[in-house]
Image (cartoon, rainbow, N blue to C red):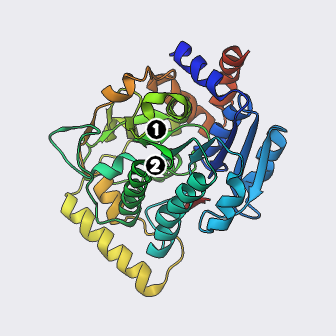
């Protein structure tokens, strides 16, 4: 893997790259890594994004451009002279107005594709999701599976964006490559593991499918893959499912978190139909009463934590990808960081990189 990654970093050496959503969970470590490789790293960020200043101070190679993927003009202004675009921007939540999902995840992606093609960008790498393959149980899902909707705004707008990416590549005007991460975790995560930890610590977490499979992927492993997909000629027009090569049941996943926070693991299990009814009732109440925040339970969460899905990463292995951070190591470090006991993992990886080179979350 180190040799493959070294080749990728060499190919990106001195390049001008653009990262949309660069202040987000995946975008931040990607920008940090690119700043040690590329000649210029542009980040398209919303005006007054609090994460933008941190990136400005990180490296003089990082240039933050205020804009919005919902504006084609914004993306066009950021794309001039760019060779590779990493499109990380998106609405990543289970609860937001449908029009926001459509505007950012669908229209924003189309703007990025259009602007990149017109600017002569060589390749756009799109961070999609394993959700685009639907909820098919009993079979090992791979990239040959048809795309399937969920009936949920997040998953379905990511699916629509996936179609747009495939069409853009087929047009011949732009190379597009897609990645489909499963359960991404690691330093900087403000939703997935932290929200589970809070619910477990407060003894509020109820399960309805404890044997649901979690396919974790450390965010730094995902960054490795993004660099490979951006530079490998074989990746043009292709999509890659990705995780760290191991799965764990939701019950066991929660037990690890419970041990870390010093709370009893969740034991109360309700039927899935009951969880679904509760979610529908809560969503209705939030809409009718116009309550702030998000419901305690949503239909997306019921579906997401209620399916025992299996995903193959055989295809991405053929690119030479192998996770450098194992789940036991990465998850222990993530929990320690969450509890304020350890430095971010990306700091530990900086020496490796140096050797190679010599909640609603809206990130647009």
Give whichever of 8, 150 is nearer the camera.
8
Q: Earlier in the sequence, mark 2 or mark 1?
A: 2
Q: Residues within 10 Å of mark 2 (few under 14, many from 20)?
A: some
How far from the left and from the top, in percent, is residue 54?
A: 78, 46
Q: Secondary structure at mark 2?
A: helix
Label ID, residue 196: 2
Relative to residue 167, is residue 43 drawn left or right? right
**Which residue sits at x=59%, y=32%?**
336
Q: Is residue 49 above or below residue 210?
A: below
**Which residue sits at x=71%, y=51%?**
80
Q: Residues within 10 Å of mark 1 (few under 14, many from 20)?
A: many
Q: Tell me, yes or no, whether the two marked residues, 2 and 1, touch with CB atoms within 8 Å.
A: yes
How far from the left and from the top, in percent, is residue 232?
A: 50, 28
Q: Is residue 99 above or below residue 352?
A: below
Relative to residue 284, is residue 201 drawn left or right? right
Q: Is residue 217 visible?
A: yes
Relative to residue 310, is residue 204 drawn left or right? right
Q: Which quadrant would residue 32 be assigned to in this image?
A: top right
Residue hosting label 1 = 257
How far from the left and from the top, in percent, is residue 289?
A: 45, 86
**Which residue sits at x=40%, y=33%?**
243
Q: Is residue 17 above or below residue 358?
A: below
Report, in whole angstroms, how far the alpha carbon at label 2 lies from the one at label 1.
8 Å
């Amino acid at each position: 893997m180190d040799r493959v990654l070294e080749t990728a970093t060499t190919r990106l050496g001195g390049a001008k790259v653009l990262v949309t959503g660069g202040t987000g969970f995946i975008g931040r470590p990607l920008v940090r890594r690119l700043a040690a490789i590329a000649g210029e790293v542009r980040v398209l960020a919303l005006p007054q994004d609090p994460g933008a200043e941190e990136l400005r101070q990180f490296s003089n190679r990082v240039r933050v451009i205020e804009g919005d993927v919902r504006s084609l003009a914004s993306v066009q202004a950021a794309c001039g002279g760019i060779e590779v675009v990493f499109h990380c921007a998106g609405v990543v939540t289970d609860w937001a107005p449908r029009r926001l999902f459509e505007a950012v995840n669908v229209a924003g992606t189309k703007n990025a594709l259009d602007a990149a093609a017109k600017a002569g960008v060589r390749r756009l790498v799109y961070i999609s999701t394993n959700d685009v393959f639907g909820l098919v149980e009993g079979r090992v899902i791979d990239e040959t599976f048809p795309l399937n909707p969920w009936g949920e705004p997040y998953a379905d707008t990511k699916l629509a964006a996936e179609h747009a990416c495939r069409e853009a590549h087929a047009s011949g005007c732009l190379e597009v490559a897609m990645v489909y991460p499963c359960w991404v975790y690691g330093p900087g995560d403000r939703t997935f593991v932290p929200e589970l930890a809070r619910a477990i610590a407060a003894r509020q977490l109820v399960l309805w499918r404890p044997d649901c499979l979690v396919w974790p992927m450390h965010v730094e492993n995902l960054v490795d893959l993004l660099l490979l997909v951006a530079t490998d000629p074989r990746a043009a027009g292709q999509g890659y499912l990705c995780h760290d090569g191991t799965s764990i049941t939701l019950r066991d996943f929660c037990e690890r978190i419970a041990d870390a926070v010093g709370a009893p693991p969740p034991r109360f299990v309700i039927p899935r139909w009951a969880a679904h009814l509760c979610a529908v009732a809560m969503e209705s109440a939030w809409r009718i009463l116009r309550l702030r925040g998000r419901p305690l339970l949503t239909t997306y969460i019921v579906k997401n934590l209620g399916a025992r899905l299996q995903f193959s990463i055989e295809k991405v292995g053929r690119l030479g990808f192998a996770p450098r951070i194992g789940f036991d190591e990465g998850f222990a470090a993530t929990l320690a960081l969450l509890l304020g006991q350890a430095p971010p993992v990306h700091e530990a990886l900086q020496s490796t990189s140096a050797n190679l080179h010599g909640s609603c979350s809206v990130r647009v």
